Each structure stands twice: as structure tokens, then as C-alpha cells.
Image (tube, rainbow, N blue to C red):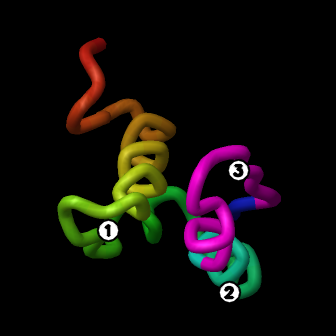
Amino acid sequence: MLLGAGICAAHASDLIAEMALAIEIGATLEDVALTIHSHPTYSEAWHEAALAGLGSPLHIVK
């Protein structure tokens, strides 16, 4: 379960709503990773972070 989120960037107000909802509904990293995030958008960062947290990032070189 996600316990918190923080953002310090341009468009932060657009991005924090997704994490606030995820926290409210008790979503896990798997839930966020399985949610479709359109490309190219800023919200893809949450998708990538969830994948990285699960050890399988898409766009980050290991």
C-alpha cells in the first residue's frame, strides 16, 4: 500500500491528484503499474516509478 507521495516539479498540481487517489483507495505499486498511463504525459512518471519500485523499469537503464 502506498503511504505517501511528494512532488517538486513543474505541473506538480496535475500529478499529485493521481497519488492522492491511489493513497485514498489503498492502491499498491502493482495497481499503479497496471494502470494505463498515456504517452507522452507527465503522469507516465508515476507509472515508471511504480515499475522501478517493482524492479522492472521500462525507460531506466539498470
The residue carrying mark 2 is 25
Relative vertical location of residue 23 with respect to residue 8 in this rendering, above or below: below
Indicate the amino acid at tag 2: Ile
Front position among marks 2 and 3: 3
Which label's residue is closer to the chain start, 2 or 1? 2
Magenta stretch: includes residue 9: yes
User: Residue lying furthest right in this view?
Assistant: 3
Of the pair 47 and 41, the residue shown nearer to us: 41
Dot 3 lies on which element? loop
Number of numbered discs overlaid on the protein picture: 3
Dot 1 lies on which element? helix
Q: How far, Cα to Cα, is label 2 from label 1?
A: 15 Å
Q: Quadrant location of the C terminus? A: top left
The residue carrying mark 3 is 7
User: Residue at left 47%, top 55%?
Assistant: 46
Image position, residue 3 (x, y; %): 80, 59
Q: Which residues are magenta?
A: 3-17
Front position among marks 3 and 1: 3
Query: Residue 4, located in which quarter of the rendered image?
Result: bottom right
Relative vertical location of residue 22 with respect to residue 32 in this rendering, above or below: below
The residue carrying mark 1 is 34
Give the main secondary structure, helix, strand or loop, of the magenta stretch: loop
